Image: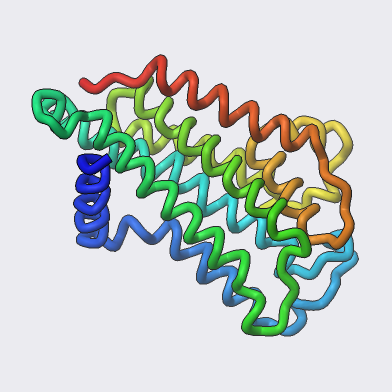
Amino acid sequence: MSATTALFRNEVRMFTRSPASLIWALLPMLAAVVIAAIPAARNPNPAFGGLSVSQAYTPTLTIFAISMTGLVLLPQLLGDYREMGFLRRLRTTPASAADLLKAFLALMAALCLLAALVIGLAPLPFGGAVAAAPLRYTVAVLLSTAAFLALGTVLCAVIPNPKAASGVGTAVAATQWFAAGMWFPRHLFPEWLSLLTDLLPGGAATTLMSEAMVPGAATNWLAVAVCGGWSAVGILVALKTFRWE
């Protein structure tokens, strides 16, 4: 654990030296604050199933931040490490490549959770409503973070070029934004589209987060199973397919 901790600290230092990488986490956080600051966006809106605009877009912005970190930033940075031979050289030292991978994934997970925390609490200073069931909301965030980080590691494993992996990750992330209702409210989806997007991690996680916004809402166990399934399958495939060189 000492090697992993030391590598984690080093990764944090290196990451702070390239603040441009933080843009994908900062943009949705800023958007959440701006939306929450608009009085009309804090009022219940029938177009969003009785939720306010701020409440309706909190899960969507959270999925945006997590998916961009996991599917775009992770494959590019981790792919660069592998392409430049960092992972191969670390295999010959006491600080193994596995230690670096754990430290790197811990940093990406921390970024996802920090962004989710800021986005989720953004309405509070303006008197807006936040999740009525914070524990359920947190579980949905953790499940989606695990799923997207695992999928990002799979992209890094199966696509050798880091820029190509990042490009494919952007395309995959866009499908998750649609499933999360970024361009069209989910409750207005036709039934067939709702069923389809509910099978994607972005759609299932958004369903869980949206339900957590409503006091007394029942838990959608299918969404829990979908999020857990994507997380488990993604982690297993990542472990089987990832290569250090």
- Between 200 and 228, the residue placed more toward the observer is 228
Residue extending farthest top: 240
Quadrant of res 18 = bottom left
Quarter of the picture holding the C terminus: top left
| Placement of 61 over or under 85, stated as above or below | below
Q: Does the image show residue 109? A: yes
How was the colour assigned to the protein in this rendering? rainbow
In the rendered image, residue 197, in percent from the top left (x then y), is placed at 73, 35
Residue displayed at 55% across by 63% down = 117
26 left or right of 21 in image:
right
122 left or right of 68 in image:
right
- Between 2 and 44, the residue placed more toward the observer is 2
Looking at the image, how many numbered discs can be counted on the residues?
A: 0
Q: Does the image show residue 183? A: no
223 left or right of 69 in image:
right
In the rendered image, residue 127, in percent from the top left (x then y), is placed at 71, 83
| Placement of 128 over or under 13, stated as above or below | below
In the rendered image, residue 153, in percent from the top left (x then y), is placed at 40, 30
Residue displayed at 42% across by 55% down = 111
186 left or right of 241 in image:
right
Quarter of the picture holding the N terminus: top left
Residue displayed at 72% across by 51% down = 136
In the rendered image, residue 185, in percent from the top left (x then y), is placed at 77, 53
Quadrant of res 36 = bottom right
Residue displayed at 47% across by 32% down = 150
